[in-house]
Image (cartoon, rainbow, N blue to C red):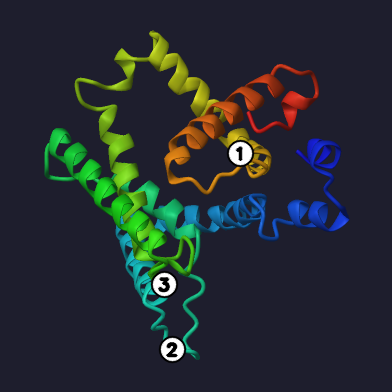
Amino acid sequence: MIVIGVICLNWNGDQIFKLVFGINRPTWYVWMLAGVYLVIPILNSFLNEYKLKGLEFFLAIWLITILLNTFQLYPFYSLELGYFAGYIGYVVLGYYLDNKLFSLSDEKMLGLGVLILVISTALHMVCSYYYIPVLSPKYHNIVIVFQAVGMFLFIKYIDRISIGFNKLQNNLLGKMIVSISICSYGMYFAHFLINQFLKLIDTNSIKLLPVFLIVLVVSSWILTYAFSKIPYIKNVCGV
């Protein structure tokens, strides 16, 4: 990404520095993951000791911090809740939803997941379009949490009902899903580079947004897949 950026987009030293250290760049995700990975062994010990009940306690406090951040009402300046806040909550949430047994049928849980995902995504789009400040603490707000819940439930139960992935994996659609899944981490970084080229075009037209979205996804996918076939580069391309 850096090499292409320097050669094709004339990136300077400041832009490279911000990219490496994730300052207002997509590479912030690398450093965030590193921090999460460092905490996971501690969470594993906590889980072994207190099981899912312990995770429910953790998630309850995490959701309180999320709500306070969402509405910017955090009043307890001397009460340190930072150990329960942040991105680690999504890891705990995903594990909890994956292992929790619900009383509803798989079909109803799938429908519930889709409903939550659609409503929260629509709300996210409205808030983003009208610049509603409820989304200002990015990824630390209740709307994004509900999107995560909907997506977690959708992924969990789509594979457990009659239209599960086992019936798809041997056909073209299934192979495409597997390929995108494998390339997704690299696509996350590649999309930033593709987006820099798209910015050279007039992207202000609302009508062109679906086209640019398709171009962004497909180009990122192709670029990442191509890198995965190049010796040495394939080891660091995110595949």
Q: Is residue 26 above or below residue 55?
A: above
Mark 1 in CB contact with mark 3 (< 8 angstroms): no
**Label placed on residue 76:** 2
Which residue is at the front of the view, 225 or 205? Answer: 205
Mark 2 secondary-structure assignment: loop
Side of 138 relative to 124 (left or right):
right
Disc on the earlier residue, 1 or 3: 3
- Badge nearest the viewer, 3 or 2: 3
Mark 1 secondary-structure assignment: helix
Amino acid type indicated by mark 2: Phe
Q: Quadrant of residue 151?
A: top left
Residue drawn at the location 38% of the way across and 72% of the way down: 70
Which residue is at the front of the view, 89 or 188? Answer: 188
Label 1: which residue? Answer: 191
State the image coordinates of residue 158 (x, y, percent, origin top left).
27, 30
Quadrant for the C terminus in the image: top right
Side of 114 relative to 230 (left or right):
left
Label 3: which residue? Answer: 133
Disc on the earlier residue, 2 or 1: 2
Mark 3 secondary-structure assignment: helix
Q: Quadrant of residue 223?
A: top right
